[in-house]
Image (spheres, rainbow, N blue to C red):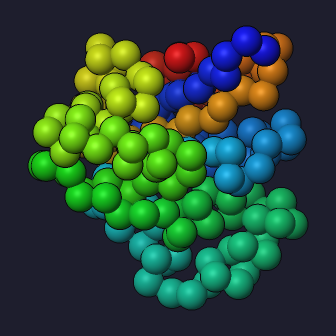
């Protein structure tokens, strides 16, 4: 593969996002290959039980290793970093967290849009994702391992309900 491709998709609910993460893991990807972005308000609403208890520390991570539905996403959210950008408190987990942190000044001055652009997502797509995340959406991303995986991952995300699926 000449250049790795980041496949992203926006989900409007936790159930669809969990289905996508589980399907990505079944394709041979690891938890560390998957990026998740959501507002802190979405995490508080959608993952209240996991973030208020230590259930995900033991049972959730153990379940993730055992393949329990939704456990991988819950574990990602539990270990995710909360990043404070102007106008939006974000929960970010996975490889895109490093890319956003590396965006540095772009992320600080442009909020999430600047950070996403710095991570390699085109401006028009970054604006769509910013609006979706502010509206309670969950953005997932995964780096395709092979050229063949690019189309398969795009289809997988679309099939489980992702909107604005793109390979960048």
User: Is residue 60 at all visible to an observer of this figure?
Assistant: yes
Q: Is residue 134 above or below residue 74?
A: above
Quadrant housing residue 119: top left
User: Where residue 122 sits: x, y (%)?
Assistant: 37, 16
Taking the image as shown, residue 157 lies to the left or right of residue 81, namely right
How many tags in the picture? 0
Name which residue lies at 72% across and 73% down: 61
Q: Residue furthest bottom?
A: 54
User: Where residue 157 sits: x, y (%)?
Assistant: 63, 27
Taking the image as shown, residue 58 lies to the left or right of residue 66, namely left
Quadrant housing residue 52: bottom left
Quadrant housing residue 17: top right
Taking the image as shown, residue 3 lies to the left or right of residue 97, namely right
User: Is residue 38 at all visible to an observer of this figure?
Assistant: no
Name which residue lies at 46% across and 49% down: 97
Indicate the quadrant containing the N terminus: top left, top right, bottom left or bottom right: top right
Q: Is residue 110 above or below residue 122?
A: below
Which is nearer the eye, 68 or 102? 102
User: Where residue 154 sits: x, y (%)?
Assistant: 65, 19
Name which residue lies at 85% across and 36% down: 27
Taking the image as shown, residue 116 lies to the left or right of residue 110, namely right
Name which residue lies at 62% across and 78% down: 56
């Amino acid at each position: 593969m000449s250049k790795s491709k980041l496949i992203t998709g926006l989900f409007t609910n936790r159930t669809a996002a969990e289905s996508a993460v589980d399907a990505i893991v079944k394709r041979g990807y690891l938890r560390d290959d998957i990026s998740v972005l959501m507002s802190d308000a979405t995490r508080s609403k959608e993952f209240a039980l996991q973030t208020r208890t230590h259930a995900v520390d033991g049972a959730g991570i153990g379940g993730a290793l055992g393949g329990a539905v939704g456990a991988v996403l819950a574990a990602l959210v539990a270990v995710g970093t909360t990043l404070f950008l102007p106008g939006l408190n974000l929960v970010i987990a996975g490889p895109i967290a490093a890319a956003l942190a590396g965006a540095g000044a772009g992320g600080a001055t442009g909020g999430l849009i600047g950070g996403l652009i710095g991570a390699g997502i085109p401006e028009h797509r970054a604006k769509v994702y910013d609006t979706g995340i502010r509206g309670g959406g969950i953005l997932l991303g995964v780096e395709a391992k092979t050229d063949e995986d690019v189309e398969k991952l795009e289809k997988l995300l679309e099939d489980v309900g992702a909107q604005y699926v793109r390979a960048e």
